[in-house]
């Protein structure tokens, strides 16, 4: 699909990865509608890119529906917003658990449901879900995050089948550890020993490719991590054994602690 001249909704635009995505789509000639919770950051970014902006809390179902109404003219959805949800699920309150699933799974599904009909009618559009390699294989101290990202991946592939032949594409973009933006970088934790990272720019470039080439799934990580998660998806018991040895440095638990205040 051609990005130049298209109208693009980017959720989670006030985060580091969201800002990088916004700049990348603007550089391709897209008109942008940006959303996030931090009004000052959102309006500053929108002003710099000549974009529209609307503040929305995706944990609020009414806000999700309002946002979809304001975005009725978009050709491309980039569902990027996500909440940190690392840590053991037994450490979450019911309210925190609900909020994580509302933002990380229900909101992108509902936005796709509400925005896709006009795209189908126009026989033109694209829906991008920004997932994670945590949606390919599970890891310690991440069961809630795994649940949302596994679900998002399944939804994207299933919806792609449903929309086949309509002119509307669906992609899932799954980064590994992002070093300079996003939830992992914001936590202040170091990646597990030996784990290599990717940049926010690489994720944005992959997202552009997914739209332009109608790619079903794009995984952005060093080759060894892509291979490891592919094997882990096939052999979860083996993956669990390897991961328990690999994360004995406590890095994943430090990640959870760094994200605790954002649940």
Image: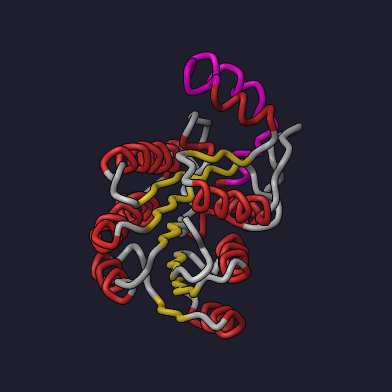
Residue 247 shown in magenta:
yes
Pick the front one: 201 or 39 = 201
Quadrant occupied by the C terminus: bottom left
Residue 100 shown in magenta:
no
| Residue 225 rendering spot, x and y as whole percentages | 64, 30
Left or right relative to 109: residue 203 = right
Left or right relative to 133: residue 254 = right
Residue in the picture at 52% in, 78% down: 42
| Residue 56 rendering spot, x and y as whole percentages | 37, 73
| Residue 255 rendering spot, x and y as whole percentages | 60, 46
Which secondary structure type mostly characterizes the magenta part of the structure?
helix
Q: Relative to 76, is 241 above or below?
A: above
Residue in the picture at 76% in, 32% down: 194
Left or right relative to 62: residue 12 = right
| Residue 206 rendering spot, x and y as whole percentages | 60, 49
Q: Please give the range of residues in magenta.
A: 231-255
Color scheme of the displayed model: secondary structure
Pick the front one: 169 or 201 = 169
Residue in the picture at 65% in, 38% down: 221
Pick the front one: 252 or 217 = 217
């Amino acid at each position: 699909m051609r990005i130049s001249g298209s109208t693009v909704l980017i959720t989670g635009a006030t985060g580091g990865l969201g800002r990088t995505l916004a700049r990348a789509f603007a550089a391709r000639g897209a008109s942008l509608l940006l959303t996030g919770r931090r009004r000052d950051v959102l309006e500053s970014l929108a002003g710099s890119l000549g974009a529209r902006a609307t503040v929305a809390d995706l944990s609020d179902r009414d806000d999700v529906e309002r946002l979809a109404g304001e975005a009725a003219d978009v050709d491309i959805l980039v569902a990027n917003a996500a909440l940190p949800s690392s840590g053991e699920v037994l450490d979450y309150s019911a309210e925190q658990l609900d909020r994580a699933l509302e933002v990380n799974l229900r909101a992108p599904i509902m936005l796709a449901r509400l925005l896709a009909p006009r795209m189908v009618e126009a026989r033109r559009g694209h829906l991008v879900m920004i997932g994670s390699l945590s949606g390919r294989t599970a890891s310690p101290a991440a069961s809630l995050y795994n649940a949302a990202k596994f679900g998002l991946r399944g939804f994207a592939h299933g919806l792609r089948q449903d929309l086949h032949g309509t002119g509307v594409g669906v992609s899932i973009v799954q980064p590994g550890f992002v070093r300079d933006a996003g939830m992992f970088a914001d936590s202040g934790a170091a990646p597990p020993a030996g784990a290599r990272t990717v940049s926010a720019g690489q994720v944005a470039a992959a997202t552009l490719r997914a739209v332009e080439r109608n790619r079903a799934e794009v995984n952005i990580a060093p080759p060894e991590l892509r291979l490891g998660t592919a094997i882990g998806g096939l052999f979860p018991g083996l993956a669990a054994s390897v991961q328990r040895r690999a994360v004995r440095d406590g890095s994943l638990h430090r990640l959870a602690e760094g994200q605790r205040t954002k649940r």
